[in-house]
């Protein structure tokens, strides 16, 4: 069974820092990997989707990379802002033939950016 | 934008009640999912569906059932609510094909309290 681990579990930084959030998964047979943001008491917002054939995706100040063979992904946040404070979740979709889109989630990294 | 709407943000139900959680998506997605999210346990898949009237058990289906009579609507049913079903419930949908197939979009969540 796929297991997803996120490190660190929590991170507190001053505004303006560049950040790296880490995600690792045990089974490299993935279809894609998705990064989400979750604000307290709310649903998940999709940030970036990386297909298994891709190495990275970028959206604004966010950049996600994928090393499928080593089972790792990183989310890079440039010039962090207090509005970035949230929990960031990594999820992998197993290889298409067995799954129909179900996701396996990490426990998340709780990020606090203080002014 | 994809819209996934859950019928309630907050619900309080009594032990033994039959509870219906409704989810509607407006993007003609084939796949729909129900997850629950608990502190320290992360997101866990309850049930999913890849077509009308089709359903598959996830990792924790006990005590739950689902219904998908129309493509856009996926209902989660707690047959006889118990206190250990107090949780945040999250609905998601995704396509089953295409360049960004299986990118998942989530609703805003339903916080269910069983007393």
Image (cartoon, coloured by chain):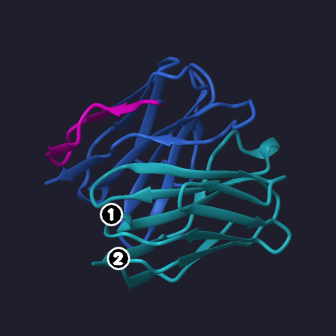
Chain colours: A cyan, B blue
Q: Tell me residue B68's x, y (percent).
A: 49, 23
- Report the side of B34 relative to A104 (left or right): left
Residue name at image x 63 percent, y 46 percent: A102
Residue that carries the numbered disc 1 in the rendered image: A83
Q: Nearer the viewer, residue A90 or B66?
A: A90
Q: Secondary structure at mark 1?
A: helix
Image height of A35 relative to A45, above or below: below
Image quadrant in which you'd find residue B96: top right
Q: Tell me residue B115's x, y (percent).
A: 13, 54
Query: Was residue B75 drawn as part of the magenta stretch in this picture?
Result: no
Residue extent of the magenta highlight: B2-21
Q: Secondary structure at mark 2?
A: strand
User: How much space separates mark 1 and mark 2, taking CA atoms?
Assistant: 8 Å
- Report the side of A30 relative to A36 (left or right): right
Residue that carries the numbered disc 2 in the rendered image: A113
Residue name at image x 56 percent, y 20 percent: B28
Which tag, 1 or 2, sits closer to the chain's start?
1
């Amino acid at each position: 069974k796929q297991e997803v681990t996120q490190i660190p579990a929590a991170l507190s930084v001053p505004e303006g820092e560049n950040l790296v959030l880490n995600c690792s998964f045990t089974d490299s047979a993935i279809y894609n990997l998705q990064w989400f943001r979750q604000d307290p008491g709310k649903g998940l917002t999709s940030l970036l989707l990386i297909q298994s054939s891709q190495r990275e995706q970028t959206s604004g100040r966010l950049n996600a990379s994928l090393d499928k063979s080593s089972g790792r992904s990183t989310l890079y946040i440039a010039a962090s802002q207090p509005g970035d404070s949230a929990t960031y979740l990594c999820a992998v979709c197993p290889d298409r033939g067995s799954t129909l889109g179900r996701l396996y989630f990490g426990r998340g990294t709780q990020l606090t950016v203080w002014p | 934008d994809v819209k996934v709407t859950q019928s309630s943000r907050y619900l309080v139900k009594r032990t033994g009640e039959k509870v219906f959680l409704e989810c509607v998506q407006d993007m003609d997605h084939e796949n729909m999912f129900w997850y629950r999210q608990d502190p320290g346990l992360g997101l866990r898949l309850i049930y999913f569906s890849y077509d009308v009237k089709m359903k598959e058990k996830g990792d924790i289906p006990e005590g739950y059932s689902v219904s998908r009579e129309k493509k856009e609507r996926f209902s989660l049913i707690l047959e006889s609510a118990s206190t250990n079903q107090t949780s945040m419930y999250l609905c998601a949908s995704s396509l089953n094909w295409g360049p960004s197939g299986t990118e998942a979009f989530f609703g805003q969540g339903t916080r269910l309290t069983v007393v």
